[in-house]
């Protein structure tokens, strides 16, 4: 799947960049022998503590882009909380790695952004196939 990443500052371009980052962090690979999607968040998170901090840094990009869309502060705090929970639990060996497969903070944050854009910038809505 080729991902075209636009460089504009308009809401549609920002939406596409956030969707691309979420894809890379949560669903860019399949676990061999299964149909389970994983991304860099899960893979980098296998490295104790440091990997989780790196994954949190990459996830913070989505919050930064959301800030550029003028999302309300409470939504930004909710997104930061999703990342904080993922990072905190991710530092626990084995349990944290399992959580990365279940609690996808980047997908949750993408949903927050999509819901906001669908309401306030309906022209950015993309019909998913």
Image: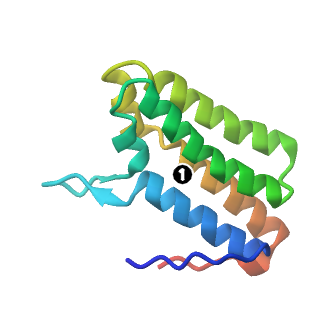
Rendered location of residue 48, percent (x, y): 37, 24
Q: Is residue 64 left or right of residue 109?
A: right
Tell me what residue is drawn at x 42 percent, y 79 percent. Answer: 2
Q: Is residue 100 above or below residue 29?
A: above
Q: Which residue is mark 1?
A: 107
Q: Is residue 72 above or below residue 14?
A: above
Tell me what residue is drawn at x 70 percent, y 68 percent. Answer: 14
Q: Nearer the viewer, residue 59 or 116?
A: 59
Label 1 neighbour load within 10 Å: few <14, some 14-19, many 20+: some
Tell me what residue is drawn at x 58 percent, y 80 percent. Answer: 127
Q: Is residue 47 left or right of residue 5?
A: left
Q: Is residue 113 left or right of residue 101?
A: right
Q: Quadrant of residue 21?
A: bottom right
Rendered location of residue 39, percent (x, y): 38, 52
Residue sitting at the far top: 92
Tell me what residue is drawn at x 52 percent, y 57 percent. Answer: 22
Helix, strand or loop under label 1? helix
Q: Nearer the viewer, residue 12 or 44?
A: 44
Q: Nearer the viewer, residue 52 or 123?
A: 52
Q: Quadrant of residue 84?
A: top right
Q: Quadrant of residue 17?
A: bottom right
Rendered location of residue 91, percent (x, y): 44, 22
Quarter of the rendering occupied by the N terminus: bottom left
């Amino acid at each position: 799947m080729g991902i075209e990443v636009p460089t504009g500052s308009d809401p549609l371009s920002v939406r596409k960049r956030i969707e691309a980052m979420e894809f890379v962090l949560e669903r860019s690979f399949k676990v061999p022998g299964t149909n389970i999607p994983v991304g860099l968040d899960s893979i980098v998170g296998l490295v104790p503590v440091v990997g989780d901090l790196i994954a949190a840094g990459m996830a913070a990009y989505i919050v930064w882009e959301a800030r550029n869309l003028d999302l309300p502060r409470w939504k930004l705090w909710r997104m930061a909380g999703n990342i904080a929970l993922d990072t905190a639990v991710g530092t626990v060996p084995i349990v944290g790695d399992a959580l990365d497969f279940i609690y996808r903070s980047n997908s949750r944050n993408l949903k927050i952004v999509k819901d906001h854009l669908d309401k306030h910038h309906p022209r950015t809505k993309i019909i998913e196939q």
